[in-house]
Image (cartoon, rainbow, N blue to C red):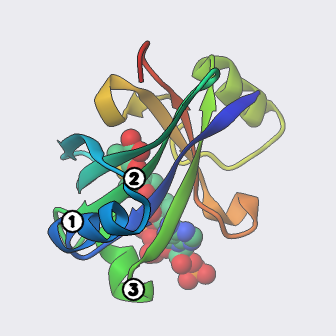
Amino acid sequence: MLSRIDHVGIAVASLADTIPLYEEAFGLTVVHQEDNDRQGVREAMLLVNNGEAGSSYVQLLEPLREDSPVGKFLAKRGPGIHHIAYGVADIDSALAALTTTGFDLVNKTPVHGTAGSRIAFVHPKALGGVLTELVEAVEGH
Ligand code: MC0
């Protein structure tokens, strides 16, 4: 079902303060920035690798509102790893399989993700405390 690690989502208080750390430490560059109002985040995608199965990124997430998943996470736990996201070729069949096996989905149908991708979250309580995202990327991402 899973084709790659698409990205690691990291909650940060400030993109402007955190992006230079990844540039300096690993020479990564920001290849995409976007506000996702429904998710309540301003995000920056830093490319790690373009592989045969698709690309992998570090995703830095700054909350747009305190009362958003990342805003609440920062208030409770402080900055750090917020979620892991796996690439899938067909998110509809991946979600159908997880529903059949009884996993608690935050999104039963896909919603809008980075750069036009279709995404869905599995509840952290269902996977040992790790918020998990599935990503069906659009061609070229
Ligand atoms: C909350 N919890 C987490 C967690 N967030 N555990 C692990 N990782 C996280 N990121 C835990 C809390 O510690 C708490 O555990 C319980 O879940 C309930 O937390 P809450 O603070 O009361 O929050 P809820 O219940 O209102 O919401 C939790 C839920 C939410 C996972 C449903 O965060 C959600 O809908 N997340 C999916 C959307 C999302 O994260 N969007 C932002 C990234 P205890 O033990 O205290 O009960 S958007 C994104 O990444 C897009 C742009 C993309 O990639 O394309």
Helix, strand or loop status at disc 3: loop
Identify which residue, 134 or 3, lies in the foreground. 3
Helix, strand or loop status at disc 2: strand
Residue 59, label in figure: 2
Q: Is residue 43 above or below residue 20?
A: above
Give the distance between the C-alpha atoms of the residues marked 1 and 2, in whole angstroms: 10 Å
Left/right placement of residue 121 relative to residue 40 reads right
Disc 2: residue Cβ within 8 A of ligand 1's nearest atom: yes
Q: Residue at x 73, y 34 (%)?
A: 99
Q: Of label 1 and label 3, which has the lower sequence position?
A: 1
**Residue 38: x, y in percent?**
24, 45
Q: Amino acid at mark 3?
A: Gly
Q: Quadrant of the C terminus?
A: top left
Q: Residue at x 39, y 53 (%)?
A: 59
Q: Nearer the viewer, mark 3 or mark 2?
A: 2
Q: Is residue 110 above or below residue 43?
A: above
Query: What residue is shown with label 3?
Result: 78
Query: What residue is shown with label 1?
Result: 15
Left/right placement of residue 57 relative to residue 99 reads left
